[in-house]
Image (cartoon, rainbow, N blue to C red):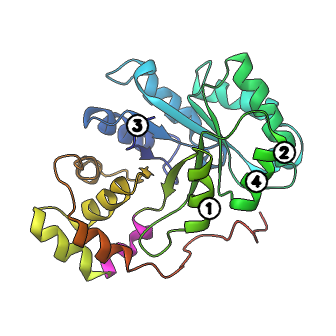
Amino acid sequence: MPQLGLGDYKADNGKEAIDAIHWAVEAGYRHVDTAGIYNNEEAVGKALQTASVPRGDVWLTTKIWNDDVRAGRTTAALDEALARLKTDYVDLLLIHWPADGYLAAWKAFEQALSAGKVRAIGVSNFMEEHLADIVDNGEILPAVNQIEYHPYLVQAEAISFSDMHDIAITAWSPLMQGKFLQEPLFAKIGKAYGKSAAQVVLRWCLQNDIIVIPKSTNQGRIRENGELFDFELSEDHMIAIDELERGERLGPDPRDFDF
């Protein structure tokens, strides 16, 4: 699974999403992250069909939404997603949130893995108690847990549990929904490397062994967000960013959500 990907949250279901994916592929990205609730899987499918590299060269992640989990229709929802994406498999399928019924959904995920509809299965927004349920009741461990992760929110307990079970972490909102621009430390560190504040934050994630999927539909920012592998933050700079952690969520709490 490539450590850098393009997030498609809030991209439209047409030219905007298609162009963004094409620009990302041209910039060297080989990982695209979408979801049923994003309502753009058709565009993602078209983009991958018309990209400059074969479908098999791009890691594709999608997610099953809460309503389908609660209704016990995970398998049907996956089949619908595959039809929208115009592919017979996805590389990674995630349960989007720990909605009621996620253990039954996980069983359906395991069956989809055996059937070849997915190549890896995982979860999103699962805290340590939710992960423990999967570990205790499932036959296959999640490959990935996608959670909110950025300098203001590290979620050490969920990451520690994931590390114990070799579950990789993907960060959503690694750029803090734009709030990184309000933190002068990132730009200050960036000057030492000739890099932008955004590149500093994303590089900090990578050096913490976190997969990042920054969302953008701007060609220049997509290219910039991908230029992360020609520099390395010093230990002092990593520690300085670590010290910004303050447990601040920008999104919903996985232990208390109502959608």
**Residue under pointer 3:** 2
| Marker disc for residue 103 | 2
State if disc 3 and disc 2 touch (CB < 8 Å): no
Please rate how many residues cluster around mark 1, counting C-alpha atoms within 10 Å: few if below 14, some from 14 to 19, many from 20.
some
180 magenta-colored: yes
- The x, y position of residue 76, in whole percent, is 81, 30
Q: Main secondary structure of the magenta part?
A: helix
Q: Which amino acid does label 1 sit on?
A: Ala
- Which mark is first along the chain, 1 or 2? 2
On screen, residue 84 above or below 55? below
Query: Which SS class for mark 2?
Result: helix
Mark in the foreground, 3 or 1: 1
On screen, residue 31 above or below 111? below
Mark in the foreground, 3 or 4: 4
The quadrant of the rendering that contains the C terminus is bottom right
State if disc 1 and disc 4 touch (CB < 8 Å): no
Q: 259 or 29: which is nearer to us?
A: 29
**Residue under pointer 4:** 132
* Residue depicted at 29% across the width and 68% down the height: 238
Please rate how many residues cluster around mark 4, counting C-alpha atoms within 10 Å: few if below 14, some from 14 to 19, many from 20.
some
**Separation of marks 2 and 4 at Cα, in angstroms:** 11 Å
**Separation of marks 2 and 1 at Cα, in angstroms:** 18 Å
State if disc 4 and disc 3 touch (CB < 8 Å): no
Q: Which amino acid does label 3 sit on?
A: Pro
Q: What residue type is labelled 4?
A: Ala
Q: Which amino acid does label 2 sit on?
A: Leu
Q: Give the range drawn in magenta.
A: 175-182
- Which mark is first along the chain, 4 or 2? 2
Please rate how many residues cluster around mark 2, counting C-alpha atoms within 10 Å: few if below 14, some from 14 to 19, many from 20.
some
Please rate how many residues cluster around mark 3, counting C-alpha atoms within 10 Å: few if below 14, some from 14 to 19, many from 20.
few
**Separation of marks 4 and 1 at Cα, in angstroms:** 10 Å
